[in-house]
Amino acid sequence: MRVIIQRVKNAQVIIDKSEERTVESGLLVFLGIEAADYASDVEWLVNKVLNLRIFNDENEIMNRSLLDSGGGLMVISQFTIMASTKKGNRPSYIRAAKHEHAFPLYELFLTTAKVQLGKKVVSGTFGSNMEVSLINDGPVTIQIDSKNKE
């Protein structure tokens, strides 16, 4: 399971060119799920995302987490971040989980984040065409992979 986390001033997703969802000041998380992922990956990754100290404290030092800051959270499913680009110029998505495996883990990620955060998590719609826009704050962009715990 892989995430790309962006600290944002605000983010917006438009789903199938009609439904709009937004989040103010917080994190935008792009979530990729692979066939080898399980509930344990979800739990570890949600905990890591919510406790990652990338928000400024009163001294303008990145020392506060999303839980500390009270910011919002938007999660967007994105299988393309599981791409392998080792061979040739066409990305391979062979590691990306199929819908029947990925969707329950995506739902578990959202539910676990909501419980730990104590408030609604804004999300896209799994498998839909989405347009995402954001204002990156910092900019701060971090990638974390549950299979490569650093």
Image (cartoon, rainbow, N blue to C red):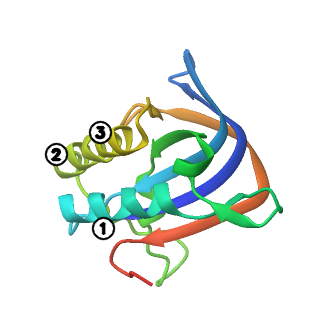
Q: Which of marks 3 and 1 is nearer the N terminus?
A: 1
Q: Which of 61 and 26 is in front in this view?
A: 61
Per the model, the C-alpha gap separating discs 3 and 2 is: 18 Å
Residue underneath mark 3: 111
Name the residue: 23% across, 53% down.
98
Q: Which of 84 and 146 is in front in this view?
A: 146
Secondary-structure class at tag 1 = loop
Whether label 3 touches label 1, CB < 8 Å:
no
Q: Which of 100 and 59 is in front in this view?
A: 59
Q: Nearer the viewer, mark 3 or mark 1?
A: 3
Q: Nearer the viewer, residue 50 or 42?
A: 50
Residue 105: give x, y in percent of width and height.
24, 49
Residue underneath mark 1: 94
Quarter occupied by the N terminus:
bottom left
Mark 3: amino acid: Thr
Position above or below: 129 against 52: above
Mark 1: amino acid: Ile
Q: Which of marks 3 and 2 is in front?
A: 3
Residue underneath mark 2: 100
Mark 2: amino acid: Glu
Per the model, the C-alpha gap separating discs 1 and 2 is: 15 Å
Per the model, the C-alpha gap separating discs 3 and 1 is: 27 Å
Asked if residue 89 lies left or right of residue 55, the reply is left
Name the residue: 43% across, 42% down.
117
Position above or below: 82 against 100: below
Q: Residues within 10 Å of mark 1 (few under 14, many from 20)?
A: few
Secondary-structure class at tag 2 = helix
Position above or below: 146 against 96: below
Residue 101 seen in the current view: yes
Q: Earlier in the sequence, mark 1 or mark 2?
A: 1
Q: Earlier in the sequence, mark 3 or mark 2?
A: 2
Name the residue: 67% across, 52% down.
7
